[in-house]
Amino acid sequence: MSRDPLDRLLEELRLREAQARTRRHFIRQCTTGMGGLALSGFLASCQLNPTESLTAQTGKGPSKRDLNPLAPLPPPFAPRVKSVIYLHMAGSPSQLEMFDYKPELAKLHNQACPQSLLQGKKFAFIRGTPKLLGPQARFEQVGESGNWVSDNLPHFKKVADEVAFLKAVHTDQFNHGPAQLFMHTGTPRLGRPSIGAWVTYGLGSENQNLPGFVVLTSGGKNPSAGKSVWGSGFLPSVYQGVQCRSKGDPVLYLEDPKGLSRDLKKSTIEAINKINQAEYAQYADPEILARINQYEMAYRMQLAVPEVMNINDEPQEVRDLYGVAPGQESFANNCLLARKLVEQGVRFVQLFDWGWDSHGTDPSTAIDLGLRNKCREIDRPITALLLDLKQRGLLEQTLVVWGGEFGRTPMQENREGKEMGFLGRDHHGDAFTMWLAGGGIRKGACHGATDEIGFAGMEGRVSVHDVHATMLHLLGFDHEQFTFDFQGRPFRLTDVQGEVIKEILA
Amino acid sequence: MALRTSHTFLALPLFSLLLLGCGQGKPVDFATEVQPILNKHCITCHGGVKKNGGISFLFQEEALAEGKSGRRAIVPGDAHGSEVIRRLLDDDPGQRMPFEKPPLSKAEIDLLKRWIDQGAPWGKHWAYIAPEPVEVPRLPQQAGLVNLENNFIRNDIDPFILARLQDTGMTPNEPAPKEVLARRLALDLTGLPPRQAWLEAYTAGQISYEALVDTLLAQPSFGEKWAGWWLDLARYADSKGYEKDNGRSMWRYRDWVIRAFNDDMPYDRFTLEQLAGDLLPNPTREQLIATGFHRNTMNNDEGGTEDEEFRVASVLDRVNTTFQVWQSTTMECVQCHTHTYDPFRHSEYYSAMAFFNNAMDEDTPHEDPVLKFYGDKEQQSAAAIQSWILKQGRPEAAQQFKNFLLYNEPLYQVHHAKNFVNGELSDTKYLSLWPGGSCHYDHIYTGGAPNLYLKYWSYHNGTVMTLRKDNEAGEILARFPIDKTQGEVIRKIPFAVVTDSIRLFIQAENPDLPGQTGTSYISWFAFLPDLPGEGQPGYAQIEQSFQELLNAETPSVPIVIENPDYMRRTTRVFERGNWLTPADTVDPATPAILNPWKAEWPNNRLGFAQWLASPENPLTARTIVNRVWHQLFGIGLVSTLEDMGSQSDPPTHPALLDWLALRLMNENGWHLKALIKDMVLSGTYRQRSESSPEQYAADPENRLYARGPRLRLSAEQIRDQALAVSGLLSPKMYGPSVMPPQPDGVWQTVYSNEAWIESQGEDRYRRGLYTYIKRTSPYPSFLSFDAGSREVCTVRRTVTNTPLQALVTLNDPVYLEAAYHLALEMQQAGTAEKAIAEGYRRAVFKELEADKKLALSELYAASLAAFQSDQEALDDFMGLGRHPDPELAALAVVANAILNLDEFITKS
């Protein structure tokens, strides 16, 4: 049996790292912290418009943004990364079976939860006095950092040194819909832009043949909060996430209708644009120039999207690395696509994987059975993604974020006060784990800690707003200055809160 | 009464600029001169949110008071002794204001000094003062202007526009050609292109422009077009939102809006019926449906959610939406703190909320209260019950029973249960007691009614439920068996007569069931008296019909109904806007800065609506005028449509805004058709929309109206128009929302079996207004063209350009089908050349010019050549299941291009 491509790549990267340290340092110096090699397009477009930025668009006449709202703009501050891959485990994974090791909780297994913990607390489904539920996984300390990772994630253990853990994230929402909205739009109510929309609005996109903000879903369902978690809220709708699908047209209406060849489509668009040019000569409305540009982009997108969405052309080695399942909707496919997309200059890639709501109502949601399977589904792809990004020099210019919308209780769920057939944990927002990796992130960092049973954050507590502030910071924004006027007042992603989590920055 | 002419108003800022350099004399105006400086430089740190140093410039009494230092920021009449001036001029960077920001200019500081020396007179922002009568400007008779006026000035709107244009040295455009104007007008009034016959009659001079306007205003499609606009404000959708986002049968409200526009219901009436139709005397069924306006708030059915949290969220949304829709005011800011810039206090938010906080709906899965629509036979039964009760001489009872049949209120929702033992709210929704289980409810008032009505279902026989006063040892009020039911039932149960408000203790026993098994699932309970006339012949029949009607399956629509006094909620201020931290109790009241409350208004939601719709309200008429203007001209007279507060963009034509507002209320009796007619009859509206690059650069947003409007059509209009010009559009109005084809797999709903079931027949080609709106997954092609998902009130849609839009109009099967049908029509014209010209004319109502003709002819030739050599391409052409000849296919390609032209998806 040949060696696992993951391990092979891992070894190769270790070697390369030792050799290349000096060289990469040099490159980073020259590109103001952007890192990476594939920057010619980015630099070229910057030079075209060296002074234009979001805050400096007051001049008369059509700006680059008027013609193309996705034209790239430099952020106000030097960025550490230029794109984001956000891996959201919809339903919320149990930190207690993955990263937050609690030996004390094992000792208290099956004991009634102390009343002091329950007072004043609200749970989605736990009623009365639940029992404590010990960790249903084995843990070990891994890598040079010695951070804890459970046996549910054997591959991830090998790359755990790449990431920075946040062990005490908290949210005030404990239902999926509102909590997902909070995690992605900064508020539990509908109507605000998602973080991907904010970022795409602020930075545009590096590749005009692809959408700037792409959404990929797996697990058979969309996230509970629906498309609003990648919506544009009050921002112009051009900044909303575009869902690229594994079945049917990858982007809606992308495919030409039957009987119309590419040549005819080209002729059609040429005719449309010729007439639109005549229209511009008459009306002098730059809106018409934008329309001309829009049709040219659509034509190019029809070629570029199917190309980037096709994983069959990837070498077998790469497909094995991720463990992809061509022709199906899978998290592994989406991880590989995420790499391809950021490689092509897509600004924000949002993955949602459904099926992490481990209540214990049936085997698929049991904390020992279903959760283990879900971990298996993501373990290799996430590890492969981090390694693949790294070997291509992309990890330094990409921010990878992993998490759910909240965490899970150290108590065993007793839905409606009843004993349940399987082991499960209820929703819990007071303390849960997220991790970040990539440019500007301090590798192997571990910030924050929970109490001995993982119920509450004891130190290094960070809020959802803090995570957002940190993400924006790495992209070159001051989250307090990055605003959009709507309904008569400036809005920001972090509302009136949020602090950059300096402890995990390199 | 003081008459304010437009000239003095317009000239005011100009004068003050001149005076800046001149020292004393001219009085400084607070609202237009001082407040902008304070808002820009000071109020962020010294206003509604922060009061650094104890200083705020938001309210007069605060600004004149002593700060923490003991010094007064403003000493009227003494600029020299005012701390604010000293600090603005201080050399010490640690002292000088604005702190760590660039200093104010000398001109700004001099202005503030003069204002303080003049006594620091406070003033109101213009929008908080009711409009005063305005004279139409009389334009100076200049040489050469006579012709211009003849062409341009068509009604009293135009002098206001021309005066401003003359000030800036600009001249208006010529009137647009008739066919261009007719298309613009038809799209604006009905959302559809003009009918061929009207166009011909108008261009041939058989009917006047005004007659064309009147004809279009009388079309049923007028109501559809303007309802589409209103439904964005009303956040109308066909689903409840949040995680489950299940369907909601709300279309009757949508139909009410269409009818209201077509009937030209006066806007004050339109306001009253939507905000308080239920509180009008003897409300009609239509008036109850109108209250659906505020039932468009979302409803969260996700398991584990607390209903009260989302009930409160709905009420907050109603406050925000009401002020957004009627007052151009961002009350949302005041939810958490006193407004940063505008004189609305934190507590005033909650005083306004108190008007809305007493509605019966409580975020329950059934969405009670819902108005039921009985079938004919059932309506006869209901009428028989009514006349029976009236015959007994009991009109008040007749009303009570009628209401209970119509919307099952008043009732108690089960989610208020406390102290569960062996029981729980199942799925956090239904009362479910296990064997030996109990819970209680506080403050239950039966009004002495001898009957309990219970809505519930059960899977098991043999349960006995006991209801007691206070606790398990209390007096038994009712004891009854519960057996297995066929689905959910409403059942009448005898109940002991109690006249006080009680604590109701409920317990369930069932020896045959294992523990932790729900004996039954209860949605709500209610109390009703006996039907009058017991013992008389026919009573049993009446009683039976009543019970049957209650259990009849009926369609319904969610409505707003006010709680009776004994269920009235207390409203409290939420600290930092958080419902979990309630503070002081407040009574209903309207914001002090706006028009005063009149004693004759009832102190409830109806009174609030009357306050909004009163002619003294400074914002209601201005707001609607500004937004209707925006619909027609693409920009508001106040460009910040959402906000007329002190941070808003100043009106470009303030006198015109007020003139229109007053005319709407006085001469036009709040009729929106008259308002719209005024606007479209103006010469301003009728201009050509062309410009040169220089003209465009001089006024890119067309704020001075030297040219006619040119705007991309809305998502719905783009589809409607394509269907209309190809002859596919169905004229069918009203009814349940439809599901035209959309790509597979767009709906992926969590925990719901609801599916997009493609409509058949003409329902595939209905106007976009009737397309089903699922909030978490709206119709994709509308989403691409900037339609929202109707989660919150949308005052305006931001127009964007994305390649995804081009993909929709190029490739969406709806547009392909339209192109094919347009090609069929084109073919009737004869030669290819004629066919192409015909297609273009049908789409954009213009003759095809030479250069455009060349482009389309080349496309036709290329297509024809391609199809002649590729038979396969004609098989199932465009996926339409047709096999056209090469000529028709080539025309369809040309039609596809025409339906994608900028001039087609733009009104100009």
Image (cartoon, coloured by chain):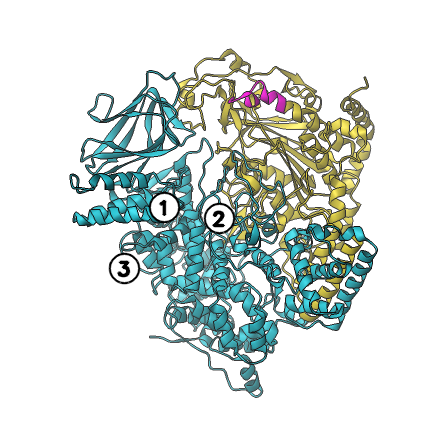
Chain colours: A yellow, B cyan
Q: Quadrant of the C terminus of chain B?
A: bottom right
Residue B542 figure quarter: top left
* Range covered by the magenta-colored residues: A360-374
Q: Is residue B328 visible?
A: no
Q: Is residue A153 visible?
A: yes
Which of these two is toward me, A191 or B872? Answer: B872
The mark found on residue B267 in the picture is none
Furthest-bottom residue in this view: B143
Packing grade of label 1 (10 A; few <14, some 14-19, many >=20) is some
Image vertical order of residue B63 relative to residue B16, above or below: above
Residue occupied by mark 3 = B598
**Callouts 1 and 2 in the same chain:** yes
Image vertical order of residue B797 relative to residue A132, above or below: below
Residue B449: image location, x then y, percent: 21, 37
Relative side of A184 to B289, left or right = right
Which amino acid type is marked by label 3?
Answer: Lys
Discs 1, 2 touching: Cβ within 8 Å:
no
Which amino acid type is marked by label 2?
Answer: Ala
Residue at point 41%, 64% (across, down): B263
Q: Quadrant of the N terminus of chain B?
A: bottom left
Residue occupied by mark 2 = B237
Residue occupied by mark 1 = B372
Residue B397: image location, x then y, percent: 21, 46
**Callouts 1 and 3 in the same chain:** yes
User: What separation in Å lies between label 1 and label 2 (alpha carbons)?
Assistant: 19 Å
Would you say residue A363 sits in the magenta stretch? yes
Q: Earlier in the sequence, mark 1 or mark 2?
A: 2
Packing grade of label 2 (10 A; few <14, some 14-19, many >=20) is many
Mark 3 secondary-structure assignment = loop
Mark 1 secondary-structure assignment = strand
Which of these two is toward me, A452 or B243? Answer: B243
Which of discs 2 and 3 lies nearer the camera? The answer is: 2
